[in-house]
Amino acid sequence: MAKAIEISYKELLDISPVKTLPLTVGVAVSGGRDSVALLHCLKRLELACEAQDVKIVAVNIEHGIRGEASVKDSEFVRELCAELDVPLYSFSVDVPAFAKQKGYTLEQAGRALRYEIFDGMTDSGKCDVIALAHHLDDQIETVFMRILRGTGIRGLCAMSVTNGRYIRPLLKYSREDIEDYIAANGLKYVDDESNLDTAYTRNFLRQQLGVIKRRFPEMGGAVQRLVDSAVENEEYFESVLPQIEVYGDEAVIKTADCANKAIAKRLILKACKALGVSQDIEEKHYAAALGLLCAENGKKLDFTHGISVHKDRDTLVFSRKKAQGGVGEIPFAMGSFDGICVEKVDLDGISFGTGEALFADLDKIPEGAVIRTRRDGDFICKFGGGTKSLGDFLTDKKVPLRTRDSLKVIADGSRILAVFGVEISADVKIDGNTKRAVALKIIK
């Protein structure tokens, strides 16, 4: 039996992550049945509670996939918004070109571009939240798609009514409920013919699920109970998860926290989310990362979406590739450079072993020496004699792998004279013949 669709003022505030008024809701409107129903319903709410400062705006994105038909759909949305007196923000993107550039499917590319625009709307203050027209049948499709892709329990959580600044006011209503609302209010909408193309995974699945639903009409409620159960499980695990450490573009998991595989997988996902990646992490990725637990120190692998992970003694370090910046190579000189300081000091005032600075013989630093970060082939002369590769030297000094690429060094070609914050080489140590000294400091 169909349920009457109604969104109350209290319900809107309950599902909105933004609780302050006035509240501006941006409604994603394609012109299709679902989004038209959502826009109409929320506009009716706006009119009913005008004194309570709820404002509705519409967001339409023309994807550049269906040529003139897509343009006409956007024109329909403009006319609808004018009729309902709803401000409209219109955008046009080239999904096929973006998909080709990134190696995405059209579905993946369209989603990425849509959410980029939606995020821009909230970030710029044009609206406080984005309302999406997903409903119960979309939830069913999402659950089955994830099952077919080999999801874990977290994937069964599917869509939530509130997710960050996104809300889904229609998630408890079925497609039939929406059709009844459209008919009862005499609303016009457009049909996207691509929704009938079963070459798209979701369209194919929707067609098959329609057959199953006719045999099992309570399927929607059953799937939602599965989702609710998965959410309860995930909320519990989240409450007992150990902490991870995040340092800019790196997230660190202690290997001791990974003894339980269920906990370990959630920590891996948590690390990835901290680096901005929360989708397309599959069982193969978890297995690869967990395989590093017994690997030798320094073992590294490419993970997914530009993230790599490596074993660093008793931790797994997840890193996101960073843009090159800071010191490339500058001539050695006195002064402050990108977090470090080089200054002359009085020999009589030097206090060794305090940890505040390293001290070197200025006259032993050759002309042409530079300040830079480490490179392949670098080596250093140890205090006890002999040379060692810089990598092995830093390992001996127990310098974490995650910090090594940002260390500043003084170098004469591949010969390292000092590593700021770590050690100087025997080549530049202060001795009885030293006349001029410099202090090498890290600026905190």
Image (cartoon, grey):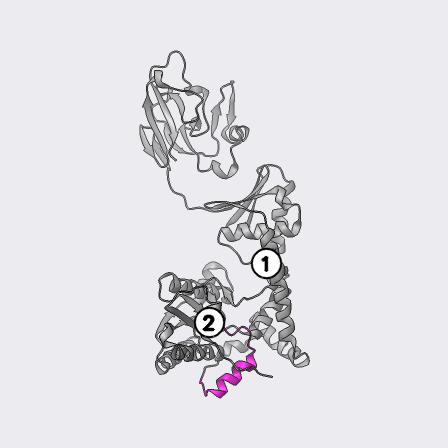
In this picture, is 188 found above or below 225?
A: below
Q: Is residue 319 visible?
A: yes
Q: Nearer the viewer, residue 205 or 104?
A: 205
- Where residue 113 sits, quadrant-wise, is bottom left
Using the numbered discs, state the Cα–Cα distance from disc 2 to disc 1 in whole angstroms.
23 Å
Provide the residue span drawn in magenta: 169-188
In this picture, is 325 found above or below 423?
A: below
Query: Which residue is label 1 attached to?
Result: 235
Q: Nearer the viewer, residue 442 or 163?
A: 163
- Other residues around mark 2 within 10 Å, as few (<14) / some (14–19) / many (≥20): some
Q: Position of residue 61 (x, y in %)?
A: 41, 71
Magenta highlight on residue 358 = no
- Where residue 443 sits, quadrant-wise, is top left
The circle on residue 12 is 2
Q: Position of residue 152 (x, y in %)?
A: 63, 59
Question: Could you tell me which residue is drawn at 32 percent across and 23 percent down?
Answer: 344
